[in-house]
Image (cartoon, helix red, strand yellow):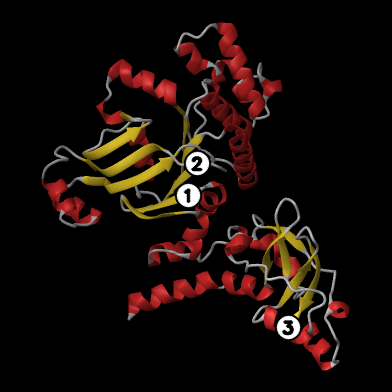
């Protein structure tokens, strides 16, 4: 999921305190380092956000993840000013959102943002196409134009044939697709998705995640996605922000979150995640270091070094054979003049964007795996040992954090 690198949403030092005097003693206590629980115990005020800063890049899926009470939904609702902030600044598409009021705020929301809720929030008395086009109706878009936009959005989510159906005639997953189509109909820059798939059964939820990623690959929207499910966050997010007690704990790519947890809190979360589903081949592959078929066994062994083996390549750089370290040793013991006869051709190949789970079965054969680009040229050498080492690293990190806590 590509993005072009410029900022579209910026939260800078944002505080939100719920209570009659949010800028009074509660704010002072929070700024001085008091915890969320301490502020509530001493002042009766509830901390929603505690010095929250993050940036969302145009065209990326940015997931804010946390348990109940972490502040994730509060953070999202400040972006479209469903919630006023206590302090800090929020800029969306160059506009200070919190400074907007009335019709100006409404127009900004309609122009720049679409929102998908956890509960589908469809009008039961309107058919599907009218539900999807409702936002455009509010904007007084002509009937023909809004129906055309609604049908385009419905086709994106695979529901073009259900335009005339009533919501009650659709399954939960289909109703959520209608909600997504409604958000897409006005072609907003930003999609705000608050626990959008949480109410769905696991299988339907996964299908919706797949569908969202497919739509995103076509439309390249900026998506701010809220979830309490780390697996969902790691699956769909370009970057993930983990929150706890109203504060940001860590922001990073799924691989960074999984392999470089910043705190014991994050490490505890990620230890139950299937690392192989998230970590990509290019995170653990080695540079190719190919060997020549006419190299002597001694030259080949020097080239292989600590690796499990090395590849030979043709004139285009495409891997043609693999020489394992044991085969090179046997060739040396047999006093072979070169390693040509020791080469094997039964090696596996993969793309650098493959996950470790996708290459796990091939790794079980013990042979190096050739990592190739879209032209088939060798760009990396994947050692089976590296796969196993990387998949065990998170457990060791978690154990280290636990020792630090109890020492």
The residue tagged 1 is 239
Quarter occupied by residue 1: top right
Tag 1–tag 2 contact (CB < 8 Å): yes
Q: Position of residue 363 (x, y in %)?
A: 72, 70
Q: In this view, does 89 lie above or below 95?
A: below
Report the residue at 52% width, 33% height from top. 221
Q: Residues within 10 Å of mark 2 (few under 14, many from 20)?
A: many
Residue 299 image label: 3
**Residue 326 image-quadrant placement:** bottom right
Q: Residue at x 62, y 45 (%)?
A: 206
Which quadrant of the view contains residue 231?
bottom right
Q: Which of 60 and 28 is in front in this view?
A: 60
Secondary structure under tag 1 reads strand
> In the shown orientation, is residue 294 left or right of residue 43?
right
Secondary structure beneath dot 3 equals helix
Q: Is residue 94 visible?
A: yes
* Closer to us: 327 or 235: 327
The percent coordinates of residue 67 (x first, y second) are 41, 52
User: Could you tell me how far apart the alpha carbons at marks 3 and 2 are, in whole angstroms?
Assistant: 47 Å
């Amino acid at each position: 999921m590509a993005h072009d690198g410029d900022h579209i949403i910026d939260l800078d030092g944002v505080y939100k305190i719920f209570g009659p005097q949010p800028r009074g003693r509660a704010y002072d206590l929070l700024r001085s380092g008091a915890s969320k629980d301490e502020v509530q115990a001493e002042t009766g005020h509830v901390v929603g956000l505690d010095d929250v800063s993050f940036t969302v890049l145009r065209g990326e899926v940015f997931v804010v993840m946390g348990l109940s009470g972490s502040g994730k939904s509060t953070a999202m609702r400040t972006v479209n000013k469903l919630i006023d902030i206590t302090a800090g600044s929020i800029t969306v598409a160059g506009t200070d959102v919190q400074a907007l009021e009335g019709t100006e705020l409404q127009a900004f929301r309609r122009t720049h943002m679409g929102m998908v809720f956890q509960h589908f929030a469809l009008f039961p008395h309107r058919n599907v196409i009218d539900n999807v086009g409702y936002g455009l109706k509010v904007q007084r878009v002509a009937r023909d134009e809004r129906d055309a936009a609604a049908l385009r959005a419905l086709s994106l989510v695979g529901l073009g044939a259900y335009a005339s159906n009533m919501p009650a005639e659709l399954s939960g997953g289909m109703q959520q697709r209608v909600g997504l189509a409604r958000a897409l109909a006005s072609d907003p820059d930003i999609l705000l998705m608050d626990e959008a798939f949480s109410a769905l059964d696991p299988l339907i939820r996964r299908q919706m995640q797949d569908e969202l990623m497919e739509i995103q690959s076509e439309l390249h929207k900026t998506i701010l996605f809220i979830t309490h499910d780390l697996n969902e966050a790691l699956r769909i997010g370009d970057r993930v922000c983990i929150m706890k007690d109203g504060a940001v704990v860590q922001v990073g790519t799924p691989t960074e979150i999984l392999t470089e947890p910043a705190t014991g809190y994050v490490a505890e979360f990620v230890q139950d995640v299937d690392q192989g589903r998230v970590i990509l081949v290019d995170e653990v592959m080695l540079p190719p270091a190919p060997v020549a078929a006419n190299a002597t066994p001694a030259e080949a062994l020097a080239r292989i070094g600590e690796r499990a083996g090395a590849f030979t390549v043709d004139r285009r750089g495409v891997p043609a054979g693999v020489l394992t370290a044991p085969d090179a040793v046997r060739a040396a013991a047999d006093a072979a003049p070169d390693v040509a006869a020791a080469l094997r051709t039964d090696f596996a190949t993969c793309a650098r964007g493959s996950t470790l789970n996708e290459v796990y079965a091939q790794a079980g054969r013990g042979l190096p795996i050739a990592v190739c680009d879209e032209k088939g040229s060798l760009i990396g050498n994947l050692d089976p040992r590296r796969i196993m080492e990387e998949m065990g690293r998170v457990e060791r990190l978690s154990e280290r954090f636990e020792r630090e806590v109890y020492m």
